[in-house]
Image (tube, rainbow, N blue to C red):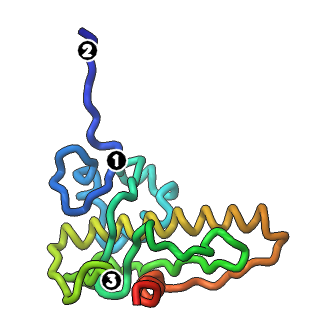
Amino acid sequence: KMPHQIIESMMISDPDRGNWGEGWDLMENIPKDQLCEIGLSPYKYTDQYAYPSVAHSCQRYTVGDKWHFAKRIMPKNFFECSGDFLEEPPADVATAYDYRLDPERDQVKKPQTDKETWRNAFMLCALTGVANKAALYFKEHHCNGEWNKNKVNFMAEAKRVLG
Protein backbone atom coordinates (compact mmCIF):
# COMPACT_ATOMS: atom_id res chain seq x y z
CA LYS A 1 0.00 0.00 0.00
CA MET A 2 1.42 3.37 -1.04
CA PRO A 3 1.17 6.20 1.47
CA HIS A 4 -0.51 9.30 0.09
CA GLN A 5 -2.06 12.55 1.14
CA ILE A 6 -5.14 14.17 -0.35
CA ILE A 7 -4.76 17.88 -1.00
CA GLU A 8 -8.10 19.66 -1.13
CA SER A 9 -6.92 23.27 -1.26
CA MET A 10 -5.56 23.47 -4.80
CA MET A 11 -8.83 24.16 -6.63
CA ILE A 12 -12.05 26.12 -6.31
CA SER A 13 -15.11 25.66 -8.45
CA ASP A 14 -18.52 25.55 -6.81
CA PRO A 15 -19.41 28.60 -4.69
CA ASP A 16 -22.44 26.83 -3.23
CA ARG A 17 -20.47 23.83 -2.02
CA GLY A 18 -19.26 23.52 1.52
CA ASN A 19 -15.54 23.65 2.14
CA TRP A 20 -14.98 19.91 1.65
CA GLY A 21 -12.86 19.11 -1.39
CA GLU A 22 -12.19 22.70 -2.46
CA GLY A 23 -9.83 25.45 -1.33
CA TRP A 24 -12.34 28.09 -0.31
CA ASP A 25 -10.96 28.13 3.25
CA LEU A 26 -7.72 29.65 1.98
CA MET A 27 -9.60 32.71 0.80
CA GLU A 28 -11.39 33.57 4.03
CA ASN A 29 -8.70 36.12 5.01
CA ILE A 30 -8.66 38.05 1.74
CA PRO A 31 -10.36 41.44 2.21
CA LYS A 32 -13.66 41.32 0.33
CA ASP A 33 -13.01 44.69 -1.30
CA GLN A 34 -9.87 43.22 -2.93
CA LEU A 35 -11.36 39.94 -4.19
CA CYS A 36 -12.11 41.15 -7.70
CA GLU A 37 -8.74 42.82 -8.15
CA ILE A 38 -6.99 39.65 -6.98
CA GLY A 39 -9.20 37.53 -9.22
CA LEU A 40 -8.38 39.66 -12.26
CA SER A 41 -4.61 39.69 -11.59
CA PRO A 42 -3.80 36.87 -9.15
CA TYR A 43 -0.04 36.77 -9.73
CA LYS A 44 0.39 40.24 -8.26
CA TYR A 45 -0.72 39.00 -4.83
CA THR A 46 0.91 35.61 -4.30
CA ASP A 47 3.27 37.05 -1.70
CA GLN A 48 0.38 38.54 0.31
CA TYR A 49 -2.34 35.91 0.25
CA ALA A 50 -2.70 32.18 -0.11
CA TYR A 51 -5.35 31.05 -2.56
CA PRO A 52 -5.93 28.03 -4.76
CA SER A 53 -3.97 27.62 -7.98
CA VAL A 54 -6.90 26.48 -10.11
CA ALA A 55 -10.27 28.13 -10.75
CA HIS A 56 -12.25 25.33 -12.39
CA SER A 57 -15.05 26.77 -14.49
CA CYS A 58 -17.82 24.21 -14.29
CA GLN A 59 -20.60 26.35 -12.81
CA ARG A 60 -22.39 29.59 -13.58
CA TYR A 61 -21.21 32.54 -11.53
CA THR A 62 -23.61 35.41 -10.87
CA VAL A 63 -23.59 38.43 -8.58
CA GLY A 64 -26.41 40.94 -8.62
CA ASP A 65 -28.30 41.41 -11.86
CA LYS A 66 -25.45 42.77 -13.98
CA TRP A 67 -22.55 40.35 -13.50
CA HIS A 68 -22.57 36.81 -14.84
CA PHE A 69 -20.09 34.34 -16.28
CA ALA A 70 -21.02 31.06 -17.93
CA LYS A 71 -18.58 29.40 -20.30
CA ARG A 72 -21.32 27.88 -22.45
CA ILE A 73 -22.78 31.22 -23.46
CA MET A 74 -19.59 33.06 -24.34
CA PRO A 75 -20.01 35.25 -27.41
CA LYS A 76 -19.34 33.10 -30.48
CA ASN A 77 -16.80 35.56 -31.90
CA PHE A 78 -14.85 36.05 -28.66
CA PHE A 79 -11.64 34.59 -30.11
CA GLU A 80 -11.80 36.55 -33.35
CA CYS A 81 -10.22 39.88 -34.22
CA SER A 82 -13.68 41.47 -34.30
CA GLY A 83 -14.72 40.01 -30.92
CA ASP A 84 -15.30 42.16 -27.87
CA PHE A 85 -13.43 41.70 -24.62
CA LEU A 86 -15.46 41.10 -21.48
CA GLU A 87 -16.06 44.09 -19.24
CA GLU A 88 -14.44 43.55 -15.84
CA PRO A 89 -16.75 43.70 -12.84
CA PRO A 90 -16.28 46.69 -10.53
CA ALA A 91 -13.90 46.39 -7.58
CA ASP A 92 -16.81 46.35 -5.12
CA VAL A 93 -18.73 43.52 -6.81
CA ALA A 94 -18.14 41.24 -3.80
CA THR A 95 -19.70 43.73 -1.37
CA ALA A 96 -22.27 45.65 -3.43
CA TYR A 97 -24.86 42.90 -3.83
CA ASP A 98 -26.74 40.44 -1.62
CA TYR A 99 -28.64 38.69 -4.42
CA ARG A 100 -28.24 37.12 -7.85
CA LEU A 101 -30.33 37.06 -10.99
CA ASP A 102 -28.92 34.38 -13.33
CA PRO A 103 -30.20 35.14 -16.86
CA GLU A 104 -30.36 31.44 -17.67
CA ARG A 105 -32.20 30.19 -14.60
CA ASP A 106 -33.69 32.85 -12.37
CA GLN A 107 -36.93 34.71 -12.98
CA VAL A 108 -36.64 36.72 -9.77
CA LYS A 109 -33.77 37.91 -7.60
CA LYS A 110 -32.45 35.19 -5.30
CA PRO A 111 -30.85 36.20 -1.99
CA GLN A 112 -27.20 35.27 -1.48
CA THR A 113 -25.27 35.03 1.76
CA ASP A 114 -22.07 37.03 2.08
CA LYS A 115 -20.09 33.84 1.51
CA GLU A 116 -22.02 32.94 -1.66
CA THR A 117 -21.61 36.48 -2.96
CA TRP A 118 -17.86 36.74 -2.44
CA ARG A 119 -17.23 33.25 -3.80
CA ASN A 120 -19.25 33.99 -6.94
CA ALA A 121 -17.56 37.40 -7.24
CA PHE A 122 -14.08 35.91 -7.06
CA MET A 123 -14.86 33.28 -9.72
CA LEU A 124 -16.56 35.87 -11.91
CA CYS A 125 -13.54 38.17 -11.73
CA ALA A 126 -10.96 35.39 -12.10
CA LEU A 127 -12.63 33.86 -15.15
CA THR A 128 -13.25 37.24 -16.77
CA GLY A 129 -9.57 38.06 -16.29
CA VAL A 130 -8.39 34.74 -17.72
CA ALA A 131 -10.73 34.98 -20.71
CA ASN A 132 -9.59 38.53 -21.52
CA LYS A 133 -5.92 37.60 -21.20
CA ALA A 134 -6.43 34.64 -23.55
CA ALA A 135 -8.31 36.83 -26.06
CA LEU A 136 -5.57 39.47 -25.90
CA TYR A 137 -2.89 36.85 -26.53
CA PHE A 138 -4.85 35.54 -29.53
CA LYS A 139 -5.36 39.03 -30.95
CA GLU A 140 -1.73 40.06 -30.46
CA HIS A 141 -0.56 36.99 -32.35
CA HIS A 142 -3.18 36.66 -35.10
CA CYS A 143 -4.77 40.03 -35.87
CA ASN A 144 -1.84 41.99 -37.33
CA GLY A 145 -2.27 44.83 -34.85
CA GLU A 146 -5.87 45.52 -35.83
CA TRP A 147 -8.54 44.24 -33.50
CA ASN A 148 -11.61 45.25 -31.56
CA LYS A 149 -10.67 46.71 -28.17
CA ASN A 150 -14.25 47.22 -26.94
CA LYS A 151 -15.41 45.66 -23.71
CA VAL A 152 -18.98 44.47 -23.23
CA ASN A 153 -20.92 43.61 -20.12
CA PHE A 154 -21.29 39.86 -20.34
CA MET A 155 -24.56 39.87 -18.40
CA ALA A 156 -26.11 42.27 -20.93
CA GLU A 157 -24.81 40.04 -23.73
CA ALA A 158 -26.24 36.94 -22.05
CA LYS A 159 -29.67 38.57 -21.72
CA ARG A 160 -29.58 39.54 -25.39
CA VAL A 161 -28.50 36.06 -26.53
CA LEU A 162 -31.02 34.28 -24.31
CA GLY A 163 -33.68 36.74 -25.23
Q: CA distance from mark 3 to mark 1?
A: 26 Å
| Identity, as a three-letter code, of the amino acid under mark 2 | Pro
Residue occupied by mark 1? 11
Q: Earlier in the sequence, mark 3 or mark 1?
A: 1
Q: Quarter-wise, where is residue 3 in the image? A: top left
Look at the image and tell me in which quarter the C terminus lies: bottom left
- Residue 133 x, y percent position in the rendering: 60, 64
- Residue 43 x, y percent position in the rendering: 51, 55
Q: CA distance from mark 3 to mark 2?
A: 46 Å
Residue occupied by mark 2? 3
- Residue 109 x, y percent position in the rendering: 20, 87
Judge from the rendering whether residue 87 lies leftward or rightward of residue 120; answer left or right.
Answer: right
- Choose mark 3 or mark 1, whichever is in front: 3
**Mark 2 vs 1: CB contact within 8 A:** no
Q: Quarter-wise, where is residue 33 in the image? A: bottom left
Furthest toward the front, the residue is 163
Vertical side of 144 occupied by 18: above or below: above
Vertical side of 113 occupied by 13: above or below: above
Disc 1, SS: strand
Residue occupied by mark 3? 103
Judge from the rendering whether residue 5 lies leftward or rightward of residue 93; answer left or right.
Answer: left
| Identity, as a three-letter code, of the amino acid under mark 1 | Met
Look at the image and tell me in which quarter the N terminus lies: top left
- Choose mark 3 or mark 2, whichever is in front: 3
Judge from the rendering whether residue 16 lies leftward or rightward of residue 121; answer left or right.
Answer: left
Question: What residue is at 41 percent from the left and 49 percent from the top?
Answer: 54
Furthest toward the right, the residue is 144
